[in-house]
Each structure stands twice: as C-alpha cells, then as structure tokens.
Image: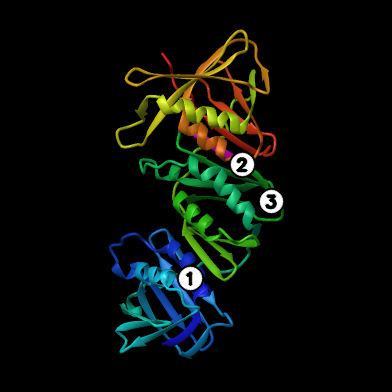
Amino acid sequence: MNFTIDREVLLENLNVISRGLPAKSPMPILTGIKMEVTASDLYMTSSNSDISVETFISDASLQIDSPGKTVVPGRFFIDIIRKINSKKVSLSLVDDKILLIKADRGEYKLHIMDPLDYPNIDFVTLENPLELPAECIKTLIKQTSFATAQSEKKPILTGVHLSLNENKLNVTATDSFRLSQTVLEIENYRPFNITIPNKSLDELARAMDNYNENVSLYFSVNKLLVKFKNVLFQTRLLDGNYPDTSRIIPPSFPIRLKFNKDELLDAVERVSLLSPREKMTASELSYSIIKLTVTEERNVILSTTNASVGDAQEELLPIDTQMNGPIMIGFSSRYLVEALRSFDSVEITLNCSEGIRPFVLTGEKEPNLTQLILPVRMD
C-alpha cells in the first residue's frame, strides 16, 4: 500500500471516522482505523459497540502507487495528521509491519495491526431511503437528545424515540423527570418505530457539523444507516418498548407566563448559583432546585434558599401573564436551562397548572416543539 493525498482532505475524513472509535475496547483491533486502498479509491472504517463509520475518498489529490489494506492505531494516526503542517501526506507500508507517514521533512512510523483480525462490518442495504435535510436532523437532535436518561437503569430511556404514523414523525426523549417532544411532517414513507441511542445521535450531529445538504436514512430491524456526502454512519437501535408518553402533557393550562427567552435564561443561571445541590439518586448527577413564585399582584419572582451559603431572589418582567391566582413551583434549574436552550424562539411561554403537575415550555417560532418538566415539592 502506497499513496499520497492532500492533508486537509484526509483530516476532514478522519474527523468523521473518529466518531466510531471507542475510547477503550475489549477488542484492541477496534481501537484502530481500517484503511483499504483500491486501484482508484481509499476506504476508511471505524467501529465500536454502537456505531460504525465508513468514508469513501475519490479525491483528485489522491495518487495511488499501489493498493493494499491495513489497520492503524486510530487516535495516534489522527493526532499526527492533525498536527503536521504539510500540504501533502504520503503513506506506505514497510514490510507489512509499519505504516510510514511522510510529511515535508518529517517521518512518522506507526506499528500496524492485521486487517484480517478486523471484524466484517455489515452495513444496512441501501434501499428505500427517507430523505431529510441535514439541518433538520441536527435540529431534531438538539431539541431532544439532552433529555434522555444518563443512567442505564432503564436502557430504553437512554435513546431518542422516533415514531412515524399518518405522515407525522414524533421525536421524543424523556428521563422520567422531563420530556422533550417535537413533530415533523413526513409524506409518502412507511410507518416505523425505533429508538436511537443518545450517544449515537450526538456523534452523528458532530459528524454532520459542516454538512448542510440532504441526508438519506436507511432502516433495518436493529440498525439505522445514515448516508451523507461520502459517509456511511450506522448505529445500532435500542431493544424494548418505549413508554407511552402521549398522556403526560396536560390538556389545558390555566396559567401562562410569556418571557423573553434570553432574559429568563440569564436570570435562572444567576439565581441557581446559590441554589442547594441535591441528587435524584446516589449515582446520578446533582441538580439545582430553584422556585418560581407569582403573587396575587402578578409579581413574578425567581428565588432560592441555601442554608449553608445564602439566598438569591430576582424579579422577572414577563411580557404577558394569564392567570387566576398565585402559584409557586419548584424545579431543577438545569432542566429549565437545557430546555430553554433547545429553542430558537425569542419569546417563550411557560404553561402551568395548579399543584404539583408538569409545566410546559413552548416557543412562537417552534410550534411543534414541547419541553415538559416535572416540578418538585417545596414543603
């Protein structure tokens, strides 16, 4: 194997390939990148237990002297290509044991692994794709993935659920304490019901960071393949039945408070600096509890009390209020901050019911996006 390629072209593809590299693996071969050079093209593959990625390079700068295949140490190879400054990079095998990298006056040698030990990656057949704009997919991930569960106690909740029925794609994420849901119109495609691991979606969003054209989605029983540009990005799907969340959102809200999103977000972040840290369970992340109070005079106050540190209180100036009495709700400031950041809308409406019932955030720019948060008791 011996070829020369433009460094920027190689690095761009390696940045995508890195999404499939495991931090550590019981199979050392999977920490490597499989490279296969044909008479005219270069293929690179990475894989872990959840994700497999393949890129196909047929660039004008690719000059192949001899074909071949190998597996190179992934992280070291990427770091070398990222750090060197030369325009061109030459790669060749030495005695089928060493990958020699030449860049200007520099030479780097990496011990390689046997490509015969690399597992065969079974990519989904490229038939009957669902076509969506890349920006649409990235937006769906931004609006939902953060609300998935981080704990593996209920594995199905660590994924984002996609359900297509009657031309409506419902995208849902919940960790049992909050819910994020958005709806997208999809025409002329068969119904499906899948749950995608949140980590796979986060890596997909990073892989598509600078890509803004159409994306093809291919479905199988237990895998989803996303094809964009010269990339095949495949993820496993989660097994199990996703819980029915259709009845969680209250049918009506007697209390509605409309805010400027950025002003509300800044106030929540300031007040939460002094809020007491509590845990849902010993193994889960801590979160900050703050309180929203609306008085009889319709004054809106955000506050927190921390016996060991101090207190914080800030009066909010809502754009509009609709209510029939005072309210007081406590909630996780982290949940509210993450929900607010999922909106591009300038104005956000906080929809509440009396008592310890979920409250819902909606935005004027995203009518199909709903963020729901369960309050906590403030006794």
- Please, what is the three-letter code of the amino acid marked with disc 1? Leu
| Whole-percent x, y for residue 78 in the image | 40, 69
Residue 23 vs residue 234, the one in the foreground:
23
In the visual, does 185 lie left or right of 91? Answer: right
In the visual, does 128 lie left or right of 71? Answer: right
Q: Residue at x 61, y 32 (%)?
A: 261
- Please, what is the three-letter code of the amino acid marked with disc 2? Thr
Kind of element beneath mark 1: helix
Q: Please, is residue 11 above or below residue 39 in the view?
A: above
- The residue wearing badge 3 is 186
- Where is residue 94, by image quadrant? bottom left
- As drawn, the label of residue 11 is 1
Q: Which of marks 2 and 1 is nearer the N terminus?
A: 1
Q: Main secondary structure of the magenta part?
A: strand
Q: Which residue is drawn at 43% across and 16% down?
A: 378
Residue at the top extreme? 296
Range of residues picked out in magenta: 177-181
Tell me if label 2 and label 1 are in contact, CB under 8 Å.
no
Q: Please, is residue 359 above or below residue 21 in the view?
A: above
Kind of element beneath mark 2: strand
Q: Please, is residue 37 above or below residue 292 in the view?
A: below
- As drawn, the label of residue 136 is none
